[in-house]
Image (cartoon, rainbow, N blue to C red):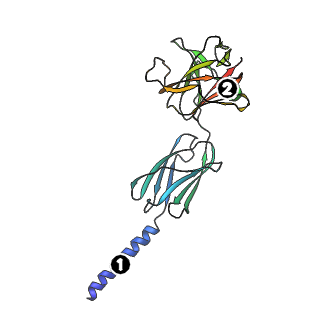
Amino acid sequence: MVRACLVVLIGALALVGTVAGAARAPLRLELTPVSPHALDPTHIVLRSATVAGLRVQTISPGGRSRFVPLNRVTPSIARGVVHYGTAGRWQVRVVEKAAGSVRLRRTVMVLPAVVTPPPPDFGPLGAENCSPPSPANTSTQGFREIFGTAVGHEELWALPFVPRGASWAQADAAAFDGLVGKEIKIVFAMTAMHLPFTARGPGGQTLAPAWGPSLHSSSNWARQPGSEWGAGFVFPTAGCWRVDVGVYGTVWLLLRS
């Protein structure tokens, strides 16, 4: 009887030690890379005695928060991927689902997004206020094509179909005459296409496509790096127009008239 009680007591003490050890198990949050560029993937590994009741939250420099989807690979390990949208000081927190209390905090300095340089036969990338407009050139296929300003290690190309009554104003840049008020079809090709398509013009005007974007299932355009879409725009005023493809790419168009 005494021996049986000792066995039960030893078992109970071992269980208490196991529970206490689990409670003391360190909570770890691994971020790779430690100092990422905006829009590039950061891989997250969350480790704890149990990760079932934990969430990972990011907070942007402007205070916007979101939870990162996690995939639990074992009871003690969960993995996820986050893309920081902008450069600056971000917070990454581990939060308990039930209580909402913060278990761990990390500060991440996010570097500016990596901008894809233009090919050797193109001029400088387009920039704010069309200083300069996006560079253009004529391909070996005879297409007058535009190289966009893209980030996140992607490429953005644009192939405009200039309507009757309008014309290119420069051979080496996306500048046009007689295009105001006319519909222009632009084919966009990007490593991975992103939405939405939005045009922003002088005085903060915002413009949605007149139609599209429509996916092209096939193409004879040699510059096509991944996905290809077509969209139509009618620009109501002259000036600098930026056509954004999600947050990953911009084509700067200068309309002189």
Which of 10/159 is in front?
159
> Could you tell me which residue is drawn at 67 percent across and 28 percent down?
127
Q: In the rendering, at what x and y percent does residue 40 appear?
A: 54, 40
Is the residue 255 above or below the residue 15 in the image? Answer: above
Please rate how many residues cluster around mark 2, counting C-alpha atoms within 10 Å: few if below 14, some from 14 to 19, many from 20: many
Q: Amino acid at mark 1?
A: Ala
Q: Amino acid at mark 2?
A: Trp
Mark 2, mark 1: which one is toward the viewer?
A: 2
Q: Residue at x 64, y 17 (%)?
A: 182
Q: Residue at x 48, y 63 (%)?
A: 26
Q: Is residue 154 left or right of residue 199?
A: left
Residue 60 pos. (x, y %): 61, 48
Residue at the spot 62% in from the left edge and 39% down from the top edge: 112
According to the image, label 2 marks what residue? 241
Instruction: Give the SS element for disc 2.
Output: strand
Residue 64 is tagged as: none
Is 153 situated left or right of 4 in this image? right
Total marks placed: 2
Q: Quadrant of the N terminus?
A: bottom left
Q: State how far apart marks 2 and 1 are (Cα).
A: 73 Å
Secondary structure of residue under mark 1: helix
Classify residue 256 by image quadrant. top right
The residue tagged 1 is 12
Q: Nearer the viewer, residue 59 or 22?
A: 59
